[in-house]
Image: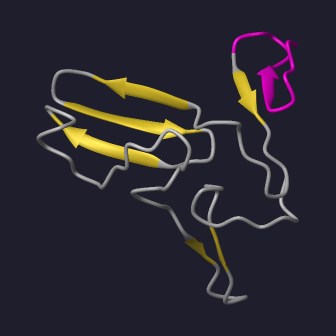
Amino acid sequence: SLWNGFGGFDGDGRHYVTRLTGRRTTPQPWINVISNASFGFHVSAEGAGFTWSRNSRDYQLTPWSNDPVSNRPGEGIYIFDHVSGKAFSPMAAVVRDASMT
């Protein structure tokens, strides 16, 4: 419900789901920040992320760009299939394939 063209709440209303098909992106980076006193990270709808320890400015573990329009990832996850020789990433910011939904 409350679908806005990019995402909405799932059937039970407990989880917000973002659907970016093809090469579509959110109008601006949509970011969730998760942290405690020792560690934190933020991750965008496209999967771009940034990780820090203790203080996000002074103790960056991965690179971050303070750009309100561009959503460059500072880290990524790749899954490699040794049988087919193909690589895949579940993060749209890392590898974008227009055929994936």
Give x and y (percent) for residue 43: 48, 39
Q: Is residue 48 above or below residue 18?
A: below
57 versus 25 height, above or below: above
Q: Is residue 19 left or right of residue 28?
A: right
Q: Which residues are magenta?
A: 1-14
Closer to the camera, 83 or 54? 54
Instruction: Tell me if 52 is positioned left or right of 30 in this view.
Output: left
Q: Quadrant of residue 85?
A: bottom right
Question: What is the x, y in percent for residue 40?
Answer: 29, 33
Question: Please, is residue 70 above or below residue 54 in the view?
Answer: below
Percent position of residue 74, x then y: 39, 57
Taking the magenta stretch, the answer to whether it contains residue 91 is no
Q: Quadrant of the N terminus?
A: top right
What kind of secondary structure does the magenta stretch mostly adopt? loop
Q: Residue at x 80, y 39 (%)?
A: 19
Tell whether 54 sits left or right of 51. left
Above-or-below relation of 101 to 94: above
**Quarter of the rendering containing residue 54:** top left
